[in-house]
Amino acid sequence: MQHYDVIVIGGGGAGLMCALTAGQRGRRVTLLEHNARVGLKIAISGGGRCNFTNLLATPENYISGNPRFCASALARFTPQDFIALVEKHKIPYHEKTLGQLFCDGSAQQVIDLLLSEMRQGGVELHLSTKVERIEKTPEGFVLHLSGGDDMQCRSLVIATGGKSIPKMGASDFGYRAAAQFGLGIVPTRPALVRVA
């Protein structure tokens, strides 16, 4: 059985950022993605050019049951922090209306940036890997994978997103895992809404 400090389930934007951050902090990390590629929603964002941040993002732009969380998250990693990563990787970008920043080229450049940063942190990546079952142990968690393999970790992050685009592999996996461990689930509602 393979042992890790951290296993991240889900290869979208949140999972990739989590894995690279943990890896760059010296943790032994692996990321599991059930699709054959990571970043599928990133690839289609911004019409294929990835609206990777917004200069005007503030906690007031988010609806949350815990408004302090947005303030804390945006203070710890600002739009300027991500812009610095984009510039480090020499990705040309431009600003559109209302502070929206887009790649001049393709959204794939942002996916490649995230994968490069993961490699720098020594993160292992397992594609086309489905988690069949999660088991809590005194040492952390054991994950039983498709194909009969098992992995063990001290910390588990489930970053599988919601059920928004089933054609791209979105599922209720995260909701089922939360229910398995007795975590409260906030009723879902649209996250992106047009303001009149």
Image (tube, rainbow, N blue to C red):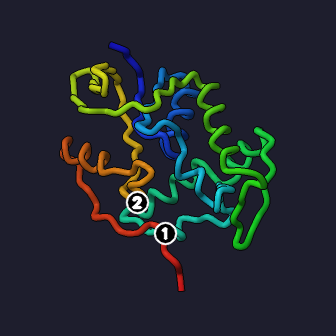
> Label 1 crowding class (10 Å Cα cut-off): few <14, some 14-19, many 20+?
few
Q: Is residue 5 left or right of residue 150?
A: right
Q: Amino acid at mark 2?
A: Ser
For the view shown, which residue lies furthest in the top direction?
Answer: 1
Q: Position of residue 157 (x, y in %)?
A: 38, 37
Q: Are marks 1 and 2 in contact (CB under 8 Å)?
A: no
- Quadrant hosting residue 66: bottom left
Instruction: Give the structural element (helix, strand or loop) at label 2.
Output: loop
Residue at image mark 2 = 164
Residue at image mark 1 = 192
Which quadrant is the C terminus positioned in?
A: bottom right
- Quadrant hosting residue 153: top left
C-alpha distance separating marks 1 and 2: 11 Å
Nearer mark to the viewer, of 1 and 2: 2
Q: Residue at x 56, y 33 (%)?
A: 20
- Above or below: residue 117 compared with residue 17: above
Q: Amino acid at mark 1?
A: Leu
Q: Position of residue 155 (x, y in %)?
A: 36, 29
Decide which of tag 1 and tag 2 comes sooner along the chain. Answer: 2
Q: Position of residue 105 (x, y in %)?
A: 76, 52
For the view shown, which residue lies furthest in the bottom direction?
Answer: 196
Q: Residue at x 61, y 26 (%)?
A: 119
Q: Is residue 38 left or right of residue 151?
A: right
> Label 2 crowding class (10 Å Cα cut-off): few <14, some 14-19, many 20+?
few
Instruction: Give the structural element (helix, strand or loop) at label 1.
Output: loop
Which quadrant is the N terminus positioned in?
A: top left
For the view shown, which residue lies furthest in the front direction?
Answer: 167
Determine which of the numbered discs, if any, sits on residue 151 in the image: none
- Quadrant hosting residue 150: top left
Q: Residue at x 66, y 62 (%)?
A: 54
- Above or below: residue 46 compared with residue 18: below
**Total marks in image:** 2
